[in-house]
Amino acid sequence: MVGGSTLSELRSSFVLAEIERDGGVSPHVGPFVDFSDVGSLLSAAGFQLPTVDIDTIHFGYPDAAILMEHLQRMGENNACITRRDRISSDIFLATAALYQHLYKRNDDHESQTEADNQVPQQEDEDETVLATVQVIYGIGWTPHESQPKPLLRGSAEHKIGQLGGL
């Protein structure tokens, strides 16, 4: 599932542009799941031994306008009821300019995930701004009698300080 740090650059650019132009803020990017809530969600759904992992991926785009166009064409519009129907061209242009200024791609920035580092990727010189996507993976097991159970408190045979000598 998509995590809470997804499109943080776009969200902050919209906030700054709207505060400057309108004096207020409305939601433009839908709410995302927070990483710390995924384990609780799995436990509340009846799963045991929840494990949560996270990947943060950076994508390059030529500019913010193309990023927003791609999001719109993918159908990734904000589904919030309180959102505005349309964005004025003034706010749209201010958001794109702020995004370009604040989140310009540096040559030093690592734009690949750790797994991709083994495969050389061709750098695109047209990618001048970054977009961050956070992917959260959650795994849980349904209860079963064969599942490992924690031992009773105080039933350990060794103290934690003795484990180095074992």
Image: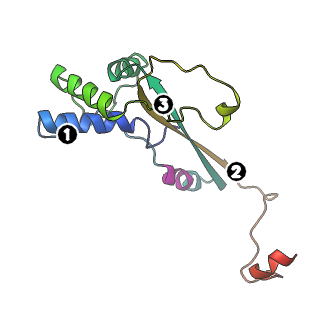
Residue at 35%, 25% (x, y): give it.
77
Q: CA distance from mark 1 to mark 3?
A: 33 Å
Give the residue number, with chain letter if any, for mark 2. 141
- Give the class, few, some or many, for how many residues have Cα within 10 Å of label 1's Cα (few <14, many ≥20): some
Q: Secondary structure at mark 2?
A: strand
Q: Nearer the viewer, mark 2 or mark 1?
A: 1
* Residue tagged 1: 25
Q: Where residue 88 appears, x then y in whole percent? A: 17, 22
Relative to the observer, which residue lies in front, 61 or 11?
Answer: 61
Residue at 30 percent of width and 31 percent of height: 101
Pick the front one: 112 or 7: 112
Q: Which residues are magenta?
A: 35-41
Q: In the displayed structure, does residue 12 sit left or right of residue 48? A: left
Q: CA distance from mark 3 to mark 2?
A: 43 Å
State the separation of the CA atoms marked 2 and 1.
41 Å
Earlier sequence position, callout 3 versus callout 2: 3
Label 2 or label 1, whichever comes before in sequence order: 1
Of badges 1 and 3, nearer the viewer stands 3
Q: Is residue 86 visible?
A: no
